[in-house]
Image (cartoon, helix red, strand yellow):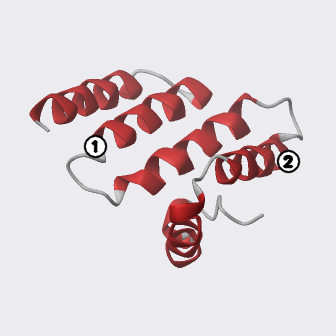
Amino acid sequence: MSDARTSAGKANAAARDLSGAPRFAAYAAAQAANVAHVAAHELGAAAYAIKAVRAAAPSGEGDSAGQLECLWQRDQLPDAIRELVLDDQRIRNEICWSVFDV
């Protein structure tokens, strides 16, 4: 867990000097590393990845690209946890910039 927290801190530090998609991608990496420390970070990693895709999309296509990313992420969920994650997304969608609205 200590290594994961250190890695998350480094990714967060790198994000500060970035903007747009690279910044959101760095934050996604930090959130993913922090899952070992706080399980609730799993949605942060997914949400930041969606924000990165939106930011990297051509002008006017961000929302559509974000929705496709969200659907792709959901397709990767194992059946054993699918409903748990989808329920968590519904509950915490608002604090995750509403990126799970599909």
Q: Position of residue 51 (x, y in %)?
A: 62, 43
Where does the C terminus fall, quadrant-wise?
bottom right
Side of 80 where 98 appears, left or right: right
Within 10 Å of disc 1 (Cα), the crowding (few <14, some 14-19, many 20+) is: many
Label 2 or label 1, whichever lies nearer to me, is: 1
| Figure check: 77 above or below 58 | below
Residue 4 percent across, percent down from the top left: 21, 33
**Residue shown at 24%/55% (left/top)?**
38
Q: Which residue is mark 1?
A: 34
Horizontal placement of 94 versus 65: left or right?
left
Q: Residues within 10 Å of mark 2 (few under 14, many from 20)?
A: some
Badge 1 marks a residue whose secondary structure is helix
Q: Amino acid at mark 2?
A: Ser
- Residue 61 against residue 80 in the figure, above or below: above
User: Rounded to the nearest whole Å, what is the CA distance between mark 2 and mark 1?
Assistant: 28 Å
Image mark for residue 75: none
* Residue at 69% across, 35% down: 53
Residue type (three-letter) at the residue carrying disc 1: Asn
| Residue that numbered label 2 is attached to | 64
Residue 40: x percent and y percent?
A: 34, 60
Check the picture and name the quadrant holding the N terminus: top left
Q: Residue furthest right?
A: 60
Q: Quadrant of residue 50?
A: top right
The residue at the far left in this view is 2
